Amino acid sequence: MTDINARIKSEIDSADIVLFLKGTPQAPQCGFSMQVVQILEHVGAPYKAINVLADNEIREGIKGFSNWPTIPQLYIKSEFIGGCDITREMFQSGELAALLDKEGVPRKQAAKA
């Protein structure tokens, strides 16, 4: 495993939910990142956010790590979930809330599409 892959794996393993995004949750730098932040805030799940714009090695490395070419990228319990479209579809269908509940991730409120 390369150093960047080890760093990324360490980040992913450090929290139940990890979001690699452009910007920060308070100031997302792209619309797709903003949508995933809004979804996570709506379901009330605590998450760790990693701003890929602050670290180009992470920004490029995460794409190879997941074999997924775009950002944002969402991980739940160290498993790659997907980007904005997949997260939005899972949220709208109720699958995201069900996955969080199944994985025992605490939430402040029930998710509603």
Image: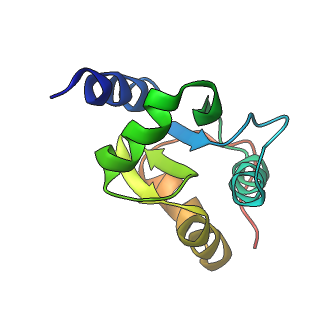
Residue positioned 84% across, 34% down in the render: 26
Residue 9 or 1: which is nearer the viewer? 1
Q: Quadrant of residue 14?
A: top left
Q: Measured from the top left, where is residue 99 in percent x and y?
A: 47, 59
Q: Is residue 22 visible?
A: yes
Residue 47 visible in the shown view = no
Q: How far from the left and from the top, in percent, is residue 107? A: 66, 43
User: As rendered, which of 11 and 31 lies closer to the eye?
Assistant: 31
> Could you tell me residue 112's position as x and y percent?
76, 68
Q: Is residue 39 above or below residue 89?
A: above
Task: Looking at this view, name the residue that lies furthest to the right.
Answer: 27
The quarter of the picture where the C terminus appears is bottom right
Please tell me how many numbered marks the rendered image carries. Answer: 0
Which of the pair 3/80 is nearer the observer? 3
Residue drawn 31% across and 56% down?
Answer: 67
Q: Is residue 30 left or right of residue 18?
A: right
Query: What's the residue at 55%, 40% (across, down)?
Result: 20
* On-image quarter of the N terminus: top left
Look at the picture and state if 56 lies above or below 89: above
Q: Is residue 2 left or right of residue 87?
A: left
> Which x, y percent locates residue 98?
52, 63
Write down the quadrant of residue 50 in the picture: top right
Q: Residue 57 lies in what quarter of the image? A: top left
